Amino acid sequence: MAEKKNTLIIAEAGVNHGGDYETAVRMIHSAKQAGADYIKFQTFKAENLVCRSASRAEYQRRNCGGEENQFEMLKRLELDFDSFISLKDECAGAGIGFLSSPFDLESIDFLSNLRMDFWKIPSGEVTNLPYLERIASKGGRVIMSTGMCSIDEVKDAIHVLTCNGIPRNDIALLHCNTQYPTPVEDVNLRAMETLRKLGCGMTGFSDHTVGTAIPVAAVALGAEIIEKHFTLDKNAAGPDHIASADPAELAAMVRAIRDVESAIGSPLKHVTESESGNVAVARKSIVASRFIGKGETLSEENLTVKRPGNGLSPMLWHRVIGTKAVRDFNKDDLITV
């Protein structure tokens, strides 16, 4: 049997640090304690990312309140480049992997110097040709979220990456819905099946639902990567806290995913070691329903089936019927032939 691979679990801090470096540090240690493999941030300069007049998404207005526009919101949530250098060092000391999604070309150039294990392309950049070309020019493995995307847009992005030097097997695709929080009826986990058919290296799920049931279900359906937003405080001000897991939920999700990994097993149907001792207890044998004298013909009139199951299997019933009793049998004696 092939060696089982653990699901790669990414704790998405995003901008849930609220632009505060010390909060980001606390999130690193919280993600490590929860058992995540990576913590992921978002790297951007607001002036490179969004026009000053751009309005916020409806969920951002709902979750944040106030009258600020998207630029003002993002500027407030921004961390400077030096902070990310320090956060990567903090991750190394804590024993958890560091990732950050770049949201502009300058941030790509900066993050390339940090030598992350993966590039993480956010859903909003899948249709950004200059962005994809810049990522590909840096080389390395890529994880790409696909929220808001048609399958043709996903194919186009893969084409750009592969034509610019990224091997197809080094691209992982995450099914995603970018509503925060995502209505359960819009999750559509089976879209992972379609993404898997594109022949990239791995397939997974980036989750924005409330709770942890959906990402656990995604693992049962074959997700090899799970990304889940988390926060230290669901009641904190910010666009993503309401759709994020708190530390206890994140830890519970990780435990549940690891349990599901163990439970998936192999296609082989067999009696496991843990249940083998119950065979004799739960199954039945052919037994005497009354006293049977030696030489008497065994029939449905003097035989029945009862526990325990350490005698003749009832599957031999028709072979036993019509034979002669080899000895005297009292009621409930196991029949031998």
Image (cartoon, rainbow, N blue to C red):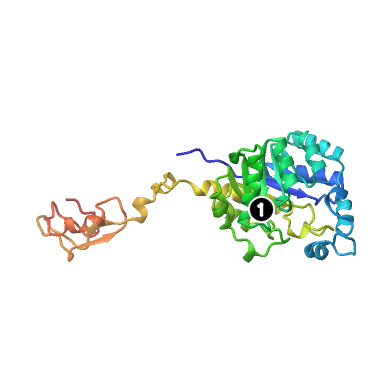
Residue situated in front as seen by the camera: 157 or 298: 157
For label 1, the residue is 146
Query: Badge 1: how crowded within 10 Å, few (<14), some, or many (20+)?
Result: many
Q: Amino acid at mark 1?
A: Thr
Asked whether the viewer can see residue 182, the reply is yes
Residue situated in front as seen by the camera: 47 or 172: 47
Which residue sits at x=16%, y=59%?
321
Q: In the rendered view, would you say 148 is above or below 121? A: below
Position of the N terminus, as image quadrant, is top left
Extreme residue toward the left, this view = 295
Asked whether the viewer can see residue 19, the reply is no
Which residue sits at x=51%, y=49%?
263
Q: Residue 159: where, in percent of width, then height?
A: 63, 45
Q: Residue 191: where, in percent of width, then height?
A: 58, 57
Q: How many marks?
A: 1
Residue 36 lies in what quarter of the image?
A: top right
Q: Residue 270: where, in percent of width, then height?
A: 38, 47
Q: Residue 114: where, in percent of width, then height?
A: 77, 34
Q: In the rendered view, would you say 291 is above or below 253? A: below
Q: Is residue 22 left or right of residue 130?
A: right
